[in-house]
Image (spheres, grey):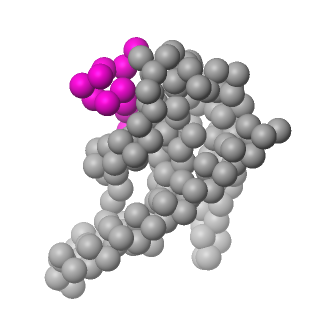
Amino acid sequence: MKNLKDIIGIIFISLTLGTALGYASISKEKTNNSEAEKFLIDKKDKDNNIVKIALLLDTSNSMDGLINQAKAQLWDIVNQFSYAKCGNGHRPGLQIALYQYGNDGLSSKEGYIQQVIGFSSDLDEISEKLFSLSTNGGEEYCGEVIQTSLRQLDWGKNPDNLKMILIT
């Protein structure tokens, strides 16, 4: 039960961090783009709200015995968001990215981090890749995988989109 509380705590911390980083990037975008540029960039996205979630899964040996539970809980969160609705009653698009980190089988040059799949709406493929991951030794560089996902993924320019990172 303690491990479940730890995982839930990590998820809430990552939600808070993801929200804060999203607001920071929005503020930066607002100062870097003129109003005309911002209108052109966001016009297409404003009509289609999107929920973007990056799943960052620790596949080091510290997750032995917990990996299946963590994957199931992450997938439950994804499923909940698939039923979400906007204020106008429409369902937003859902895009999920998946990273694994801390696994000795991953490149040390990449910080033991691997982007398994970039943002995708194909929930079947995402599920297949998520549930195929397994643990193997390793070092956990949580900050590194968060920074890598922020740098590598196309989070978009629409400030109305929900952008989150879930890390276990």
Q: Nearer the viewer, residue 10 or 132?
A: 10
The residues colored magenta run: 105-122
Q: Quadrant of residue 131?
A: top right
**Image side of residue 42 versus residue 161, left or right:** left
**Image side of residue 108 versus residue 48, left or right:** left
Residue shown at 65%/39% (left/top)?
A: 75
**Image side of residue 54 versus residue 39, left or right:** right
Position in image of residue 125 (x %, y %): 52, 29
Quadrant of image for the N terminus: top right
- Residue reaching furthest to the right: 1
Residue shown at 40%/64% (left/top)?
A: 21
Position in image of residue 29 (x %, y %): 26, 73
Quadrant of image for the C terminus: top right
Position in image of residue 34 (x %, y %): 17, 82
Q: Nearer the viewer, residue 148 or 53?
A: 148
**Above or below for 53 versus 128:** below
Residue shown at 62%/56% (left/top)?
A: 12
Reply yes or no: does residue 127 show up in magenta.
Answer: no
Position in image of residue 109 (x %, y %): 24, 25
Reply yes or no: does residue 115 show up in magenta.
Answer: yes
**Above or below for 125 versus 1:** above
**Above or below for 4 versus 35:** above
